[in-house]
Amino acid sequence: MLVNMRGRYHLEKWQHAPDRKVSLFACRIQRLSPATILMNAPVSGEIGDWVVAQFNELGRLRGQIQRRLGFGFVMSLDLDEQARRRILEKIVWLEKFQNFAVSDTRRHTRIVPTNPQSTLVLPDASLVSCFVIDISSSGAAVSADIEVKIGMPLALGTVVGRVVRRLDPGFAIQFTETIPSADLERRLIRSIDQLAPDLRKHIQAAGQSRNRPKASVPAA
């Protein structure tokens, strides 16, 4: 079992689709065998869709989606017997000599969050699920199924920032405030279900503030 290895992927049906603005996404292996791979991923296709994933340590892997998950999917690997033996040898070697454990926030400026699933809040208050590639006290790198522009304001979890750079895949966000290392994952890693109630409260509070009668000014 090999876990926490980061990579990128695309759905073959989207690679040349003219209406697709974003087709390449970040991912992380949660479980790998010579037959199947379970990945954390921000975008899932349909059962039977072909996926091409690329990992620095494993190379190019192609397969079909077998099962969709809440944040990712399980795909079968399209390998012949010789290729399956080679991938098994790689898995054994990597498990023995490599460590893909997520980084410790106390020792690293830029870290890989334990849970990569979070939510972007866009300027129109819509919520978009995203994959968090890495985070720091001043910014984050994320991958999501949205087209962004440099300077675009948004929030990652409960932290506001702006898009400052496009990545391959994804984009970089610079926060408007510096977040203490101890608070990074608590504030940045929020699912849509976790974030929606807080967002509704803020919207309701803002509405109540706008509708509240202004105090009358005493006549001079």
Image (cartoon, helix red, strand yellow):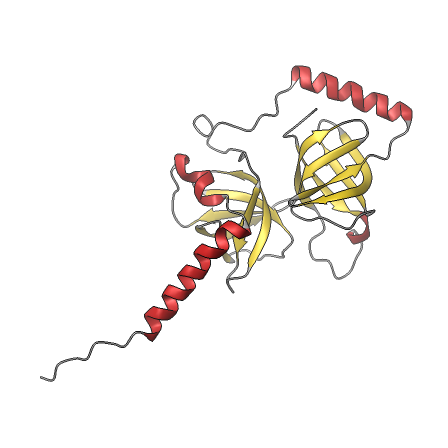
Q: Quadrant of the C terminus?
A: bottom left
> Is 182 situated above or below 50?
above
- Residue at image point 54% right, 55% down: 150
> Is 130 situated above or below 123?
above
Q: Is residue 155 visible?
A: no
> Is 11 situated above or below 97?
below
- Residue at image point 63% right, 57% down: 147
Q: Quadrant of the N terminus?
A: top right
| Residue 31, position as x, y percentages in the image | 70, 30
Q: Residue 102: name its quadrant.
A: top right
| Residue 156, position as x, y percentages in the image | 50, 49
Q: Is residue 157 visible?
A: yes
| Residue 169, position as x, y percentages in the image | 65, 44
- The residue furthest bottom is 219
- The residue furthest left is 220
Left-right relation of 20 to 129: right
Left-right relation of 215 to 21: left
Left-right relation of 173 to 99: left
- Residue at image point 46% right, 32% down: 109
- Residue at image point 75% right, 50% down: 45
- The total of numbered circles placed on residues is 0
Residue 82 vs residue 45, the one in the foreground = 45
| Residue 61, position as x, y percentages in the image | 79, 34
